[in-house]
Image (cartoon, rainbow, N blue to C red):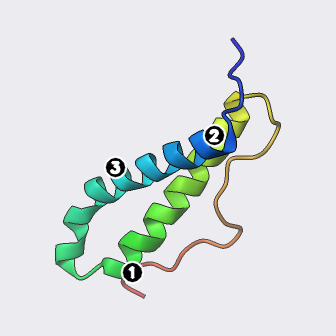
Amino acid sequence: MAYPKLPENDYRKAIGQFRLQLNGIMNCFRCYGMDSDVDSASEEIVRLAEQLGMRVRGKDIPLRVRDNPRRRPTE
């Protein structure tokens, strides 16, 4: 099954909706003082979701967010 590429404006709208839903899910971690970690984790998840979308449409790319691991919250 092939997945056609969306027009750019529809694609940006879908990514925006995904980001809003993800921030709604991750919002519960903000009460623990993890604001900057929640923001950066959300952006990394969005990038990973975009890569997955490209991969399922047939683009041969690795699924990864960053070359270096993130710092641990306790460091």
Whichever of labels 1 and 2 marks the residue nearer the N terminus, that label is 1
Q: Nearer the viewer, mark 3 or mark 2?
A: 3
Give me the disc on residue 52. 2
Quadrant housing the N terminus: top right
Disc 1 and disc 3 in contact, CB within 8 angstroms: no
Query: Can you tell which quarter of the image residue 73 is in?
Result: bottom left
| Residue, disc 1 | 36
Q: Of helix, strand and loop, which one carries label 1?
A: helix
Whichever of labels 1 and 3 marks the residue nearer the N terminus, that label is 3
Expressed as whole percent of the image width and height from the top left, the position of residue 60 reads 83, 37
Q: Residues within 10 Å of mark 2 (few under 14, many from 20)?
A: some
Q: Nearer the viewer, mark 1 or mark 3?
A: 3
Residue located 72% across and 16% down the image? 2
Disc 3 and disc 2 in contact, CB within 8 angstroms: no
The residue lying furthest to the front in this view is: 9
Three-letter amino acid code at the position of disc 3 = Gln
Whichever of labels 3 and 2 marks the residue nearer the N terminus, that label is 3
| Residue, disc 3 | 21
Expressed as whole percent of the image width and height from the top left, the position of residue 51 reads 67, 46
Label 1 and label 3: CA atoms lie apart by 18 Å
The residue lying furthest to the right in this view is: 60
